[in-house]
Image (cartoon, rainbow, N blue to C red):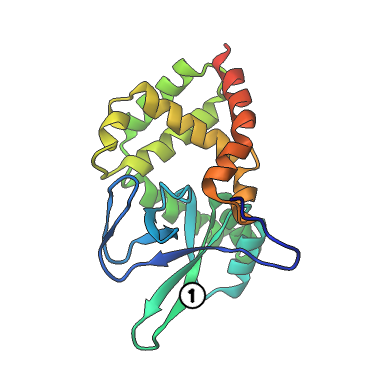
């Protein structure tokens, strides 16, 4: 059943910072204490399987930054953690698109400070990315989809590298550059970047209903990219 937002109603996506070990029901990834997960019909999902792994974390504490980043992000989620002392869930921050956070930081901070924060985030990301793997994944994407713009092929490869770092199980197919893994990575990118998928999730649509809704739009772009 499609879940839509009625006038005046908010339907924020909620993820939880867990206080005890769990496991993603779709990919089997072990989620240790402090990791983030989303509950979907009471089933725990890692952020990758929940289609939220492209978002970056903004901790609470800077109201102006949080407000602006939320404003500019098409897709966002609220992060909650259960307080045993207070016996309630408390807001820890939000997850937003990195481009939205970049824009918010530029508006909130002096340019020098904003660039410093951006460099820190990129340095942390680079520390877990296999450069050779990313480069080869990007080449395979463009071989399979010659119409894909080079900058987007690089973005797809970088996200795939981050998504599969440290994983087991389905990680193997991605590391071997299997055609299916390439297809899934490119399709996910197109879904987020070139369709209204994120807007549907933000408005409360079920993940699978939203994917069905944008399937034709995604297939059209993939067909275009397959052409030289």
**Residue 46 coordinates in the image, percent (x, y):** 37, 53
Q: Residue at x 48, y 47 (%)?
A: 51
Q: What residue sits 65% from the left and 66% below the top?
A: 10
| Corner quadrant of residue 223 | top right
Observer-nearest residue: 10 or 163?
10
Residue pictured at 29% horizontal, 36% vertical: 170
Identity of the residue furthest to the right in this view = 7
In the rendered image, the quadrant that contains the C terminus is top right
**Label 1 crowding class (10 Å Cα cut-off): few <14, some 14-19, many 20+?**
some
Residue at the outermost front position: 1
Residue 40 lies in what quarter of the image? bottom left
Image-quadrant location for residue 179: top left
Helix, strand or loop at label 1? It is strand
Q: Position of residue 101 (x, y in %)?
A: 57, 57
Q: Which residue is mark 1?
A: 91
- Vertical arrangement, residue 208 with respect to residue 216, above or below: below
Q: Residue at x 50, y 36 (%)?
A: 188
Visible in this render: residue 209? yes
Q: Is residue 194 visible?
A: no
Q: Tell me where residue 28 appears, x and y as whole percent.
A: 28, 48
Determine the residue located farthest toward the bottom in the rendered image. Answer: 86
Q: Is residue 54 above or below residue 174?
A: below
């Amino acid at each position: 059943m499609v879940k839509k937002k009625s006038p005046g109603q908010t339907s924020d996506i909620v993820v939880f910072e867990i206080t005890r070990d769990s496991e993603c029901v779709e990919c089997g990834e072990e989620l240790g204490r402090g990791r983030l997960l989303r509950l979907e019909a009471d089933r725990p999902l890692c952020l990758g399987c929940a289609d939220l792994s492209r978002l970056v974390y903004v901790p609470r504490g800077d109201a102006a930054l949080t407000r602006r980043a939320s404003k500019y992000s098409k897709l966002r989620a609220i992060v909650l953690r259960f307080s045993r002392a207070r016996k309630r869930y408390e807001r820890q921050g939000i997850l937003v698109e990195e481009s939205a956070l970049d824009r918010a930081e530029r508006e909130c901070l002096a340019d020098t400070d904003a660039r410093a924060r951006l460099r820190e985030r990129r340095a942390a990301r680079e520390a877990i990315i296999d450069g050779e793997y990313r480069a080869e994944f990007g080449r395979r994407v463009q071989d399979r989809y010659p119409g894909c713009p080079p900058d987007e092929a690089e973005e797809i490869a970088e996200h795939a590298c981050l998504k599969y770092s440290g994983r087991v199980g389905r990680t193997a197919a991605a590391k071997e550059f299997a055609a299916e893994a390439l297809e899934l990575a490119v399709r996910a990118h197109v879904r987020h970047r070139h369709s209204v998928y994120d807007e549907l999730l933000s408005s409360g649509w079920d993940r699978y209903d939203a994917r069905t809704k944008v399937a034709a739009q995604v297939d059209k772009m993939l067909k275009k990219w397959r052409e030289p």
